[in-house]
Image (tube, rainbow, N blue to C red):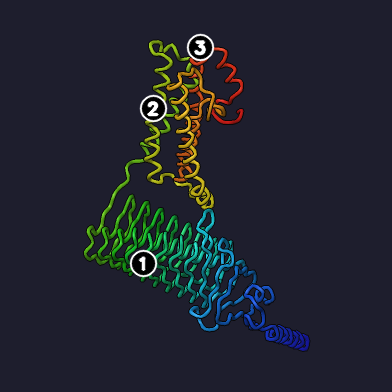
Amino acid sequence: MNKKNDLIAVATILTLMFFVTSAMVVSATTIYVPDNYVTIQEAVNAANEGDIIIARDGTYFENINVNKRLTIRSENGYAFTTVIAANPKNHVFRVSADYVNINGLTITGATSNKLPEYAAGIYLELGVDYSNISDNNVSHNGDGIWIWNSSNNIIANNTANSNGNIGIFLAPISDNNTIIDNIVNLNNVSGIELWSSNNNMIANNTASGNDRSIYLFESSENTLINNNADSNKNSGICLLVSGNNLLQNNILSNNNYGIYLDKSRNNRLQNNTLSNNNYGIYMFSSESIIDLNNFIDNKENIYSETSRPQILEIISSIAGLLAMLYIAFKYKRHFSRFSNLSKKVIVGLQLFIIILNIFFYLSLISQNSWLISFNVIFILVSKVFGLPIFALGVFIIFWSMYYLIKEIIVRKNKMMVKGPYAFVRHPMYLGWIVGVLGLALFGNSLIGLIYSFILALNLSHISEYEEEDLRTRIGHEYVEYINKVPKLFPFRM
């Protein structure tokens, strides 16, 4: 039995020695560019997992896809080695593998500012973890560094200045990352921005001249410590619908808002220095712990504003539209109750209440009520398409008004069959629906989407009453028009 155990032990030792020896044989290879390969991309393609690619001093015009575990760095630091996007519409570095290190490069020229995707200097795509991005200058891109749904990465000692959108961007669900000792100045939107990203460490960063220095949207359990935000147009630190974050030992000076909280609860603001801001701490519908902060020469040290009771607006909007919808469906059955009122008065009453409810609805949108937060990708897409859809709705309304005035009022025609009226019988109502839908998408408002649907039903039934009157006044010609042209949407329902 002892001999058998001894043999097993010897076999185990030999096996371990084999694996150790194999690991030593397959050690990392160092590849030099342009010595071994002319371009960095060629070196990446030829490299094995774990290899090191060193770029000699010089300028490289490339868009580089990194799809394996590698270290890519300069020989003498970012002042001597620059990578410029060959195609400015694409990311300079697109990383799709874990454990990638990019160090000591100037990375620039990915200048596309067009949605839905800004080009970035360094882009970590879906699910890239345990990478290290450090000691780079990532400036004059659409975004400097963009981390998409990736976790446990280190972003350290980078300079991300003068980018068209954001210096360092984490979105969505990018958790447990460390963003430390970076300089993020003069970016058009934010120095550092997090969307639906939790448990990140943001420390010792310097941010100046951005619209917002550090911005968190629907992000929780993050630690913001020892950051310096000076002379940003809007806010030093801004939290929107974000809770349970720690803001500690930050220096926030010469901003409009030192710290701005909107619908953000249970955050801890501790030992921060807020000086020469218009508002030191501004809270809208937010409750947080404010402890031992130092306020110096702010116009207003702490300002708290409570949102108006939105539940009343929600109830009034939905109830008003449902009531009008009820009247529309039951119009003929209950018309005896309104025997002293003409159909025009009933229609006018419906339109008045709809317009009144639209004002309630707009106030809800302006407060970002009922955010559709369960899907961040939906939020991004709806932000992109919301405003164009709203603009389309406004265009349809004014296009309809133009032809209505031109043909009916000026030329005294009985019927309108030109312009938008050649496609739908009630284009102005269509414009209303499209416009309200666009605002709902842009505001990520669930109440707005419900409102759009009910509004469409309501206007559809109101148009039926109008058409009864038009059939009576115009006759057979209008009946033919009805048979040819859809009522509210440019397709047959």
| Residue at the spot of label 3 | 472
Which label sits on residue 353?
2
Which label sits on residue 383?
none
The amino acid beneath tag 3 is: Thr
Quarter of the image where the C terminus is located: top right
The amino acid beneath tag 1 is: Ser
| Circles 1 and 3: CB atoms closer than 8 Å | no
Give the residue displayed 49% in from the left and 74% down from the top: 136
Residue situated in front as seen by the camera: 287 or 435 = 435
Give the residue displayed 47% in from the left and 37% down from the top: 395
Q: Nearer the viewer, mark 1 or mark 3?
A: 3
For residue 122, side relative to residue 306 (left or right): right
The amino acid beneath tag 2 is: Ile
Label 2: few (<14), some (14–19) or many (≥20) C-alpha neighbours in 10 Å: some
| Residue at the spot of label 1 | 208
Say what secondary structure mark 1 lies in.
Answer: strand
Q: Earlier in the sequence, mark 2 or mark 1?
A: 1
Q: Residue 40: x percent and y percent?
A: 62, 75
Q: Residue 64: x percent and y percent?
A: 61, 69
Q: Nearer the viewer, mark 2 or mark 3?
A: 3
Say what secondary structure mark 2 lies in.
Answer: helix
Q: Earlier in the sequence, mark 1 or mark 3?
A: 1
Q: CA distance from mark 1 to mark 3?
A: 68 Å
Residue situated in front as seen by the camera: 253 or 194 = 253
